[in-house]
């Protein structure tokens, strides 16, 4: 179990951390704290018997949700100033919904997503020879 956990962390840490940096609009220690919390939550759910499918998208959603929850906590926001940045967590807290943006470019994939668009959940191939759509996990941005 410990070896597989270490491999999961090694494989997914950097992209998940990159997404935390994007959500916080900062690359300070707070991004590492959010990343660690996301791994902890997702791995705990796996131990409780949830399926181990689509881990990276689950980790990314957990990062986003953690940033929003922490930004809403006044005492935590006071301890971690990065949660109050208008371009990062504070903007996510103020957003009424998280909706996919339109017009994503496959030529500029997010660092938070796998290199293969088919490996990310939310991709679709409605036509047999059509190229996959952009990864769903790279298309989430807050909307006011």
Image (cartoon, helix red, strand yellow):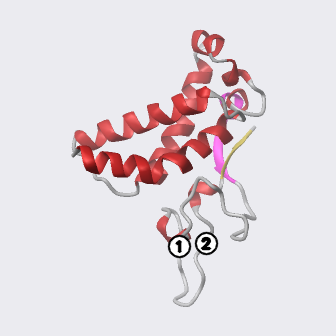
Q: Is residue 70 magenta?
A: no
Q: Residues within 10 Å of mark 2 (few under 14, many from 20)?
A: some
Q: Is residue 99 magenta?
A: yes
Percent across and percent down for residue 12 are 46, 51
Question: What residue is shown with label 2?
Answer: 133
Q: Residue at x 54, y 70 (%)?
A: 116
Most extreme residue toward the right is: 86
Q: How many marks?
A: 2
Q: Is residue 63 left or right of residue 138?
A: left
Rendered image: mark on residue 124 = 1
- Specify start and end residues of the magenta stretch as a single range: 93-100
Look at the picture and state if 94 lies above or below 114. Answer: above
Q: Nearer the viewer, residue 67 or 4?
A: 4
Q: Residue at x 31, y 46 (%)?
A: 5
Q: Residue at x 69, y 24 (%)?
A: 82
Q: Quadrant of residue 97?
A: top right
Rendered image: mark on residue 86 = none
Percent across and percent down for residue 14 are 54, 48
Q: Secondary structure at mark 1?
A: loop
Percent across and percent down for residue 35 are 51, 36
Mark pair 2, 1: CA separation: 6 Å
């Amino acid at each position: 179990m410990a070896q597989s956990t270490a491999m999961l962390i090694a494989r997914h840490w950097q992209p998940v951390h990159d997404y935390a940096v994007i959500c916080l609009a900062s690359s300070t220690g707070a991004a590492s704290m959010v990343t660690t919390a996301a791994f902890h939550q997702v791995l705990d759910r796996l131990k409780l018997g949830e399926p181990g499918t689509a881990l990276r998208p689950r980790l990314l959603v957990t990062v986003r949700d953690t940033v929003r929850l922490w930004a809403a906590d006044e005492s935590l926001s006071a301890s971690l100033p990065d949660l109050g940045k208008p371009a990062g967590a504070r903007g996510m807290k103020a957003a009424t919904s998280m909706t996919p943006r339109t017009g994503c470019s496959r030529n500029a994939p997010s660092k938070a997503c796998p290199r293969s668009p088919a490996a990310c959940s939310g991709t679709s191939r409605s036509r047999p020879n059509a190229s996959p759509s952009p990864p769903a996990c790279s298309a989430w941005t807050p909307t006011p």
